[in-house]
Image: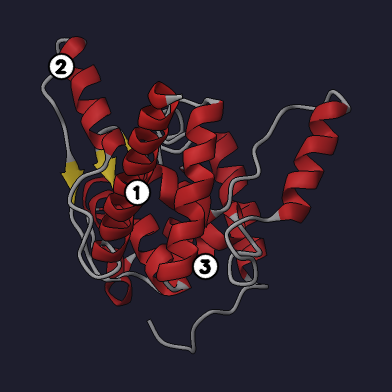
C-alpha cells in the first residue's frame, strides 16, 4: 500500500506539473509569436540526415498584415465551420467515419484548431497518444485564445513548402511578394497545397492543384469574414 501511495503522489505531481507548464505555454503564445515548432525542428533534422543543408524560412507577421483572402481560403479549404465550432467539427467527424467504414478513400476531419494545436505543441506522426494530446491542446487554445489568434498562429506556423512555414514565407519564396499583397487566386492556390505541401508545390502547380485552386475560389464566395478592403 505504501508503494502505491508513493506512485499515486508522484503521478499527481507529474500531472500537476504537466498542466501548469502547458497552461503557461498556451497563455504565453496567446500574446507572443511562436518562434519555432516541433515540425520545423524535425524537418531540419531530416534534411541534415539526407545530407542537405537545413532550410527554415519562417517570418512571423500579424494577421492584419496578411491578405484578407488568406484566412478565407483556408477556411474554405480546410474547415468551413471554423467560426462556429468549439475546436471539433463533430458533423465532419461523423461524415469521415461513415466514408471510412463504407470503404471510401480515407480522409481526416481535423479542424484548423486541431491542426494549430498539433503544429505548435506536438509531433506530426499519428498515434493514439498524439491524438489524445491533440484533443487536450485543442481544448486549451479554444478556451484561452480567440478565433482570430488561432487563425493567426495557424497561418504563421503551418508548413507551406520545402522548409517554408507561414504565409509571409510562402509569399516571399513562391510568389515574390508579401503576405499582405497575396491575391485571391494565390491564397486559394496556397490553401490547395496544404493537405500535402511537400507534394503539391504552389510555386509550380500541377493541373490537379490548379483544379483544387478553382474549387476553393468558388467556395470562398460563400465566406465573408472582412469588410471590403485589402
Which residue of the protein is positioned furthest toward the right in this rendering?
102
Q: Which-is-in-front pick, marks 3 and 1?
A: 1
Q: Is residue 59 left or right of residue 215?
A: left
> What is the spatial separation of the Cα atoms under label 1 and label 2, in whole angstroms?
37 Å
> What is the spatial separation of the Cα atoms under label 3 and label 2, in whole angstroms?
36 Å
177 up-or-down from 22: above or below = below
Q: Which comes before the other along the chain, label 3 or label 2?
A: 2
Picture quadrant of residue 2: top left
User: Residue 110, percent across and down?
Assistant: 59, 46
Q: Residue at x 76, y 40 (%)?
A: 96
> What is the spatial separation of the Cα atoms under label 3 and label 1, in whole angstroms?
39 Å
Q: Residue at x 39, y 35 (%)?
A: 11
Is residue 107 in view from this perspective?
A: yes
Q: Nearer the viewer, residue 73 or 22?
A: 22
Residue bearing mark 3: 72
Please give the label number shown on residue 57: none
Label 1: how many residues lie within 10 Å, few (<14), some (14-19) or many (20+)? few
Please give the label number shown on residue 16: 1
Q: Residue at x 32, y 69 (%)?
A: 66
Secondary structure under tag 3 reads helix
Q: Which comes before the other along the chain, label 3 or label 1?
A: 1
Q: Which-is-in-front pick, marks 3 and 2?
A: 2
Please give the label number shown on residue 48: 2
Q: Which-is-in-front pick, marks 1 and 2?
A: 1
Secondary structure under tag 2 reads helix
Amino acid at each position: 500500500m505504501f508503494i502505491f501511495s508513493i506512485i499515486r503522489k508522484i503521478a499527481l505531481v507529474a500531472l500537476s506539473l504537466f498542466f501548469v507548464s502547458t497552461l503557461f505555454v498556451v497563455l504565453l503564445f496567446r500574446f507572443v509569436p511562436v518562434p519555432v515548432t516541433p515540425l520545423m525542428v524535425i524537418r531540419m533534422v531530416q534534411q541534415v540526415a539526407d545530407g542537405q543543408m537545413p532550410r527554415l524560412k519562417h517570418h512571423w507577421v500579424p494577421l492584419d498584415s496578411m491578405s484578407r483572402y488568406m484566412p478565407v481560403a483556408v477556411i474554405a479549404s480546410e474547415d468551413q465551420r471554423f467560426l462556429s465550432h468549439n475546436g471539433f467539427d463533430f458533423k465532419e467527424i461523423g461524415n469521415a467515419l461513415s466514408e471510412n467504414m463504407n470503404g471510401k478513400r480515407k480522409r481526416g476531419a481535423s479542424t484548423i484548431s486541431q491542426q494549430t494545436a498539433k503544429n505548435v505543441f506536438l509531433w506530426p506522426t499519428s498515434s493514439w497518444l498524439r491524438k489524445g494530446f491533440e484533443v487536450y491542446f485543442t481544448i486549451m487554445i479554444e478556451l484561452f485564445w480567440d478565433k482570430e489568434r488561432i487563425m493567426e498562429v495557424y497561418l504563421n506556423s503551418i508548413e507551406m513548402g520545402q522548409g517554408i512555414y507561414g504565409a509571409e514565407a510562402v509569399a516571399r519564396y513562391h510568389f515574390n511578394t508579401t503576405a499582405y499583397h497575396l491575391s485571391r487566386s494565390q491564397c486559394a492556390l496556397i490553401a490547395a497545397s496544404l493537405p500535402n505541401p511537400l507534394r503539391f508545390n504552389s510555386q509550380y502547380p500541377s493541373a490537379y492543384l490548379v483544379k483544387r485552386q478553382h474549387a476553393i475560389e468558388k467556395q470562398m464566395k460563400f465566406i465573408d469574414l472582412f469588410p471590403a478592403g485589402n
